[in-house]
């Protein structure tokens, strides 16, 4: 027998009609409704330890968020999972600043995902293990939760330490990213919770990680959070017998010891959660352009390029993935003959006029999805406007990269 469907979930809340009465968009009313209709086949968010059998990052991140928002606020929780290859950015990060997008596209299979929590950018694959420790905000201590992870690593025979950012290291090199801490609930309310999320590198493809997280857009200024780059190593470089299963067993043991937990580990699959609409909505929303790129904070990109005819300098401002405004100036060189001055002035006037038209066309378009050919067609520009063509194809390469 299938479980009853949960109310439809939207970005801002949950709505439904139940017995002729509207269910308000609130955490409290949704939990009350969920508790009433849950069946034995529906996973409960009230266990202390979960291991996901899925390697689908959209599911795992949605399941993590569901647990965080529906677990009893005064109880600890541990979640462990692995993902197929993907790059995960923080809630308030800029993908064009953080990621080598051409390398991401060239992979043809690695996905970009914006998680619900803040913090920095990380690379996931089956060679690392992701964990999150959820606690009441009143007892949450990031250093204390890092110590749980540290003891698990040391149990594998690796002499690790915790740095001042609560990353797990061997020497000066990270073996674990701690990209985010997320908190919910107003101060002095019973629904306050926080979690410590991390990615333990066990046998990760470090070359792929380095390629994807390498970005040189130094002149891109963003209002979002920038990642802190650090050298990284795998656990297996210090203990070749270290495995995903071994680390999971170690951290589960340390978590139980820390919080006095004896409950059995709950293993979860995607099929178990097919009737939880909150999770299903998350699986659909995370890969969408509106979430992955459309949540990007405002940024300004200033750049220049030399051409045979001179230099172009551009300034692009974008917010929520769309272009707010664009400005470009031209500096012509290489016309030493005085008789060419009139021709040069015509070229300058024509180029600057065309670029004002380009600015008008770009405004409101999606950043990173620019087609020089389409804009040239829209402007009815042919081969006699080489300067504008050069600038447009340069902008296409720059913004789309």
Image: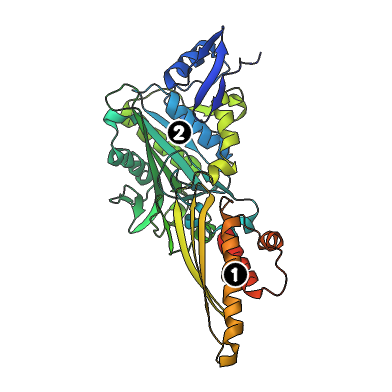
Question: Toward the viewer: 155 or 149?
Answer: 149
Residue underneath mark 2:
79
Q: Where 326 falls versus 94 (above or below)?
A: below
- Figure colour scheme: rainbow
Report the residue that reaches farthest toward the front: 342
Residue underneath mark 1:
391
1 vs 2, front mark: 1
Q: Where 51 falls versus 307 (above or below)?
A: above
Is label 2 in a helix, a strand or a loop? strand
Q: Where 66 falls versus 351 (above or below)?
A: above
Question: Toward the viewer: 37 or 380?
Answer: 380
Q: Quadrant of the N terminus?
A: top right
Name the residue: 51% across, 56% down: 325
Work out how far the residue at label 1 is from the one at label 2, CA to CA, in angstroms: 50 Å
Residue 10, given in percent of the width and then of the height, sits at 54, 28
Residue 39 can be seen in this image: no
Name the residue: 33% across, 27% down: 192
Residue 42, given in percent of the width and then of the height, sits at 56, 19
Residue 321 can be seen in this image: yes
Q: How many marks?
A: 2
Q: Position of 297 compared to 353: left or right?
A: left
> Is the residue marked by circle 2 packed among few (<14), some (14-19), or many (20+) residues within 10 Å?
many
Q: Quadrant of the C terminus?
A: bottom right
Earlier residue among tags 1 and 2: 2
Q: Quadrant of residue 228?
A: bottom left
């Amino acid at each position: 027998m299938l479980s009853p469907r949960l109310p439809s979930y939207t970005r801002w809340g949950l709505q439904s009609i139940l017995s002729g009465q509207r269910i308000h968009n609130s955490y409290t009313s949704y939990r009350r409704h969920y508790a009433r209709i849950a069946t034995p086949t529906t996973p409960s968010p009230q266990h202390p330890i979960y291991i996901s059998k899925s390697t689908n990052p959209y599911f795992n991140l949605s399941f993590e968020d569901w647990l965080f928002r529906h677990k009893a606020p005064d109880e600890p929780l541990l979640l462990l999972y692995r993902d197929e290859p993907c790059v995960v950015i923080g809630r308030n990060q800029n993908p064009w600043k953080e990621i080598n997008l051409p390398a991401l596209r060239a992979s043809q299979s690695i996905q970009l995902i914006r998680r619900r929590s803040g913090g920095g950018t990380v690379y996931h694959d089956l060679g690392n293990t992701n964990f999150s420790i959820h606690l009441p905000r009143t007892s949450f201590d990031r250093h204390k939760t890092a110590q749980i992870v540290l003891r698990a690593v040391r149990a594998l025979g690796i002499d690790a330490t915790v740095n001042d950012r609560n990353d797990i290291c061997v020497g000066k090199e990270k073996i674990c990213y701690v990209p985010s801490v997320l908190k919910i609930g107003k101060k002095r309310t019973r629904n306050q919770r926080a979690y410590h999320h991390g990615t333990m590198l066990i046998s990760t493809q470090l070359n792929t990680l380095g390629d994807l997280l390498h970005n040189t857009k130094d002149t891109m200024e963003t209002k979002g959070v920038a990642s802190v780059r650090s050298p990284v190593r795998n656990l297996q470089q210090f203990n070749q017998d270290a495995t995903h299963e071994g680390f999971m067993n170690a951290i589960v043991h340390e978590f139980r010891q820390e919080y006095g937990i004896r409950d059995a580990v709950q293993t979860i699959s995607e099929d178990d959660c097919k009737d939880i609409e909150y999770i299903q909505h998350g699986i659909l929303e995370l890969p969408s352009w509106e979430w992955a790129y459309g949540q990007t904070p405002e940024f300004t990109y200033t750049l220049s390029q030399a051409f045979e005819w001179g230099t172009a300098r551009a300034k692009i401002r974008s917010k929520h993935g769309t272009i707010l405004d664009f400005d470009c100036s031209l500096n012509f060189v290489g016309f030493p003959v005085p008789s060419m001055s009139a021709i040069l002035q015509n070229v300058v006037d024509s180029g600057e006029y065309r670029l004002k038209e380009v600015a008008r066309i770009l405004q409101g378009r999606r950043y990173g999805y620019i087609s020089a050919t389409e804009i040239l067609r829209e402007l009815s520009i042919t081969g006699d406007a080489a300067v504008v063509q050069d600038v447009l194809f340069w902008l296409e390469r720059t913004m789309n990269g």
